[in-house]
Amino acid sequence: MARFSLVVLCSGRGSNLQALIHALDSGTLPAGIAAVCSDKPDCAALERARKAGIATCALRQSDFPDRAAFDRALFDEVALLQPDLVLLAGYMRIIDPAVVEQWIGRMINIHPSLLPKYPGLRTHARAIDAGDAEHGASVHYVTAELDGGPVIAQAALPILADDTPESLAGRLLPFEHRLLVATVRLIATGEIALEGNRVVRNGVALRAPLRLNDGGDLG
Ligand code: GAR
């Protein structure tokens, strides 16, 4: 059987991408990355991909008349690669709904909050300002609603009394990495899928998102 094929979209640092590359290199993720694509041709994530010998593609918004035209062009390139799954790993653009529609069930995003709390930006600061006891990250199927698609899995951690948005983001990041790898593993092995608007595991609809346990697995 052909290897489960990923295309990863990134806009910045690429630490989640790096976690995937480590997992692939160590043989703990039964998949391959066909390409890493970006809206930021100079971003560190593309450099990480090149170092790992992974194909890259990058487009600039300024070369296109509008946002929808950019999205169509980028996803035309993605479609040529025929990936089984598109991963938004620190991809900081809102994708045109007509494009998203074509990838429903085949595109996931990692978001730094316990969705449905705090879609959008400044998630760490908003969790602290709200006085929340815990914070976390979610991996969800992408739908036209911003950060609103069905949540597959989450990782949570306590917010400490002296946390700043930066310290909280820094403590969350290693959990994000484990969460993303573990979630992609379940999708690549066929255990998790989207049916309608419900996430199913081995054919049974999840009643709540999976939670990352201390062992780095999704229970
Ligand atoms: C991660 O924290 C990810 O959850 C967040 O951007 C960061 C990317 O880090 N994504 C979003 O905020 C999407 N709305 P990375 O480039 O080091 O993987």
Image (cartoon, rainbow, N blue to C red):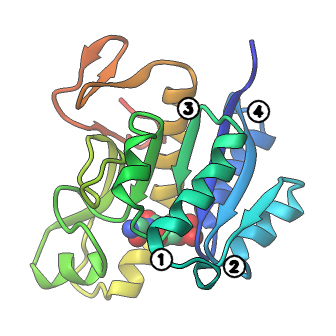
**Alpha carbon of mark 1 to alpha carbon of mark 4: how far?**
41 Å
| Residue reaching furthest to the front | 65
Mark 2 / mark 1, whichever is N-terminal: 2
Task: Tell me the crowding category of disc 2: few under 14, some 14 to 19, or many 20 or more residues within 10 angstroms, Cα based.
Answer: some
* Residues tagged 4 and 3 counted as in contact (Cβ below 8 A): no
**195 relative to 160, above or below:** above
**Alpha carbon of mark 2 to alpha carbon of mark 1: how far?**
21 Å
Does the closest atom of ligand 1 sit within 8 Å of the Cβ of label 3?
Answer: no
**Alpha carbon of mark 3 to alpha carbon of mark 2: how far?**
26 Å
Task: Tell me the crowding category of disc 3: few under 14, some 14 to 19, or many 20 or more residues within 10 angstroms, Cα based.
Answer: some
Res 5 visible: yes
The x, y position of residue 174, in whole percent, is 52, 61
**Marking on residue 43:** 2
Mark 1 / mark 4, whichever is N-terminal: 4
* Residue found at x 25% / y 25%: 196
Identify the residue position indicated by label 3 in the image.
185
* Residue found at x 55% / y 45%: 86
Q: Which secondary structure, mark 3?
A: helix
Identify the residue position indicated by label 1 in the image.
66
In this orientation, which residue lies closer to the viewer: 166 or 14?
14
**Alpha carbon of mark 2 to alpha carbon of mark 4: how far?**
27 Å
**Marking on residue 27:** 4
**102 relative to 11, above or below:** above
Res 90 visible: no
